[in-house]
Every structure is written in structure tokens, then in C-alpha cells.
Image: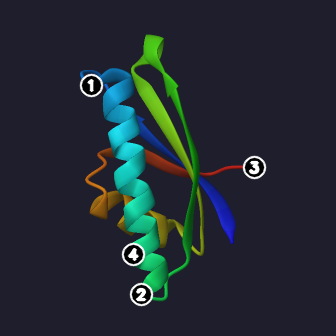
Amino acid sequence: MQRYAVEVYSPRGGDAEVRAAADRLRQAARALTTGGTPITYLWSLFLPADETSFHIVDGISRDAVREAARRAALDAARIVEAA
């Protein structure tokens, strides 16, 4: 599996919204994995001064991670490979 960073602009909700988004992404990853598309939520980072969060996941493809983000109702600005 490859590691990806899901970048999300989070201007209003701050830390509480980032935590809620992380929970939704974790649940979406579990559901996809149960359905045969392995995705593992790892952790999230919030940069309050930039109003941006990064959710780090392992997945079999960028498309699979994009689907997890969609199911989690994340408005992902970018999904990029991470190391």
C-alpha cells in the first residue's frame, strides 16, 4: 500500500471539525476495507494558522483514497502521495 495525504481547507470548524472529519474518514476507511478495498486511516494534522488539515492514510490507490474522502464528506483540495 502507498501512503497518501488528504489536504482539506478547514476555515470554520477549527480543531473540532478536523476531529469530526478524521472520525468520518476512519469510518469510511473501515467500510471500504470491509468491502475489499484496503484503506487504513493513520493520523491527522491541523495547521490552525493556515486553516488546513492533512489526513494521512494508507491505501491501494489514489482513487481508493479519493472514495474514502468522498464517503467521509471531505472537500479534499488535494490527495498526494506521502512518505
Dot 1 and dot 2 residues touching (CB under 8 Å):
no
SS for dot 2: loop
Q: Residue furthest top?
A: 49
Q: Residue at x 40, y 37 (%)?
A: 19
> Is the residue 1 above or below the residue 20 in the image?
below
Neighbourhood count class around disc 3 (C-alpha, 10 Å): few under 14, some 14–19, many 20 upward? few
Question: What residue would you read off at disc 4?
Answer: 31
Q: Residue at x 45, y 58 (%)?
A: 26
Dot 3 and dot 2 residues touching (CB under 8 Å):
no
The numbered mark, 1 or 3, whose residue comes first in the sequence reads 1
Tag on residue 13?
Answer: 1
* Colour scheme of the picture: rainbow
Residue 48 sits in which quadrant?
A: top left
Residue 5, horizontal then vertical, whole percent: 56, 48
Q: Which amino acid, by three-letter code, is at mark 3? A: Ala
> Is the residue 30 above or below the residue 35 in the image?
above
Is residue 75 rendered to the left or right of residue 7?
left
Question: What residue would you read off at disc 3?
Answer: 83
Residue 23, horizontal then vertical, whole percent: 39, 50
